[in-house]
Image (cartoon, rainbow, N blue to C red):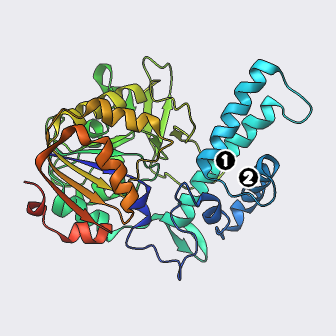
Amino acid sequence: MALFVFGAGATRGASFVDPTKDPCLPPLDSDFFTQLQRVQNQKHQSLIKQVTQDVVELFGVNFSVTVETVFTTLENTIRMLETTGENRDFRRSELQEKRSRLEQAIAVAFEDSLAEKAAGHSSLTPRPCDYHSRFVSDLLQAGDDIISFNYDCLLDFALRDRGSGKWHPRYGYGFKLGARGKLLTGDQFWRPTTPPPPGNDNTVHLYKLHGSLHFQISGPDDNPCIYLKQRPYTKQKGNLKFSIIPPEWHKAYDKSAYANLWKRAASAIHENKEFVFIGYSLPLTDSHATALFLTSVPKTSIKSLVLVNPDPEARRRIRTVVQRGLRKNTRVVSFNKLEEFVAAKRSLWGR
């Protein structure tokens, strides 16, 4: 079996992405605010204006920052005020409101870039990606593992639509189900229609380590309840409710339902022999993900390593982090784009 690791580049490389037809692209950390300001849906303009003003207040008019930088600055400023006390310029409640608005802006950017347009506005219908669909139907095998650091549901929809015989969301997400499975609800919508989905032993596993826009996690940390929403992106009245780990420095990966997901992801890294990284750059700031791979890859265990990324520096970082698992005869294959990868047969790099 193989382990696939999905990053933001996999969503950015979707088949429908075309800036000449739709200016708002699925955002990357580095250009999030550029994409956010390209959103044309009028219902979001007030929020976008507020978020832009929030960033200007923190970084000045000519700001050039990543979304992780803004979240981390808010995180550290809130923590500092807990130690030093509030002053006239910064109040804890105001900073928390800025953080909440920025989380909502993430959903806004994904709605505008990943949902079909109707009369110029985002609809409830998600855009299907030909490349994700081909990945699920042609390359993915029952029992494979996927680690995703993405909030969006592009892969989730592809699994629902093309994952018959491979995907069962009740078991595939890796959540604890509790007595009689009461801790997880909403999974029926995300099941393929035919044939009956596989059980826990042979389903594909998708571990979304930073959460998802269709996750709603509630209840105590030691017994959390998970609801899988049908509409990941669309906001109608009030704030959109979802559960993600924002791109802060101190990520809460060891709390609530996430602790089990990271534990199961570590096991997947340890047990698999074929690794495929798709659009994932292993950013230097994500020390948690780096530590996960460094501590989980067994020595000289990797038979094949596939890197789907046009950035040679990103490919080098990944090779460095998994270096412990590389053998002298490990087969290393590179692709620049997702469409190139899904066009190749699995026999090129794996079983």
User: Eyeballing the image, is 17 above or below 31?
Assistant: below
3D distance between C-alphas at marks 2 and 1: 6 Å
In the image, residue 223 sits, relative to residue 17, either above or below, namely above
Residue 102 numbered mark, or none: 1
- Residue at 75% x, 51% y is 55
Give the crowd class for mark 1: few <14, some 14-19, many >=20 residues within 10 Å.
Answer: many
Residue in the foreground of this view, choosing between 241 and 317: 317
Residue extending farthest bottom: 20
Residue at the right extreme? 88
Give the residue type at disc 2: Val
Residue 207 rendering spot, x and y as whole percentages:
33, 40
Residue 282: horizontal and vertical position, in percent? 41, 47
The amino acid sitting under disc 1 is: Leu
Residue at left offset 60%, top offset 65%: 35
Where does the image place residue 269, in percent across and percent down from the top left? 24, 37
Q: What residue is rendered at 40% in x and 38% in y?
A: 289
Quadrant of the rendering where the C terminus is positioned: bottom left
Q: Which of 262 and 136 is in front in this view?
A: 262
Q: How many other residues sit within 10 Å of disc 2, few (<14), some (14-19) or many (≥20)? A: many
Label 1 residue SS: helix
Q: What element carries label 2?
A: helix
> Taking 35 as reference, is 211 left or right?
left
Visible residue check, residue 223? yes
Q: Is 139 above or below relative to 17?
A: above
Quadrant where the image shows the N terminus: top left
Q: Is residue 252 toward the left or the right of residue 61 in the image?
A: left
As drawn, which residue projects farthest toward the front? 328
Q: Nearer the viewer, residue 196 or 210?
A: 210
Q: Position of residue 259 (x, y in %)?
A: 40, 26
Residue occupied by mark 2: 51
Q: Do the residues labelled 2 and 1 touch (CB within 8 Å)?
A: yes
